[in-house]
Amino acid sequence: MKNYSYLYLFTISIAVLLVIFGFIVWNSGIYAETFLNDATRKNFILITLGLSFCLSLYAVHRGLIKSEKRIDYLKFFLGSFIILTVIAIIPLMTVAYYLPGKTSAYAASYTYSPRGHKSCAGANVDDPDLGRNIKICHPEGNYQFDKDIFVSKKTNALGAVILFALTTP
């Protein structure tokens, strides 16, 4: 297929649109309902730091960084860390979402969290298994009044996935 043909342009356009659509579906479905535990988050950061360090050493060895300033090496390292983190979080959260686990339920009090610029409206709940406060987006029921919430979740080795959340009137 030639790079200047309409078929190539059509294929690339459809592929880019599918990637954008897939990211939107992943962000609203999987990312909003999956919470990683502390050990998984720490290991993820350490592995990503190690990979970006190895990538930086490879770039220095191959001469890909043309400047001799040390700040440019640091910029390359931090840039590769940020890019690897953004790219690697997608398969990690997807694996945590689809990994089987133990289903459990609990009831707790919550506080209403309004919609922000980059977040949804929902309920802030202290999760006993994760040991931190999580935000459950759009639970069932009237969640604008601070009452009690019933949460059903699946806990696996990587974290927890919220299956269902219902507020009490």
Image: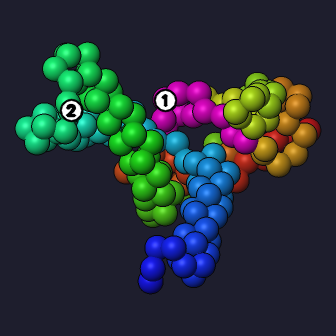
Q: On screen, 100 above or below 120?
A: below
- The reply to whether callout 1 and callout 2 are in contact (CB within 8 Å) is no
| Residue 61: mark in rendering | none
Q: Is residue 16 above or below residue 121?
A: below
Is residue 133 part of the magenta span, yes or no? yes
Which element type, helix, strand or loop, lies under badge 2?
loop
Q: Which one is in front, 66 or 88?
A: 66
Label whose residue precedes the other's in the sequence (1 or 2) = 2
What residue sits right under mark 1 in the picture?
131
* Residue indicated by mark 2: 65
Image coordinates of residue 19 in percent, x first then y, are: 57, 62
Q: How is the image coloured?
A: rainbow
Figure quadrant of residue 81: top left
Q: Split into 4 quadrants, where in the image is the N terminus?
A: bottom left
**Dividing the picture into quarters, in which one does residue 54 lie?**
top left
Q: In this view of the protein, can residue 102 be seen by the observer?
A: no
Query: Residue 86 vs residue 141: left or right?
Result: left
Rendering coords of residue 41 (x, y %): 38, 36
Magenta residues, dominant SS class: strand
Range of residues picked out in magenta: 127-137
- Which residue occupies 47% across, 52% down? 90
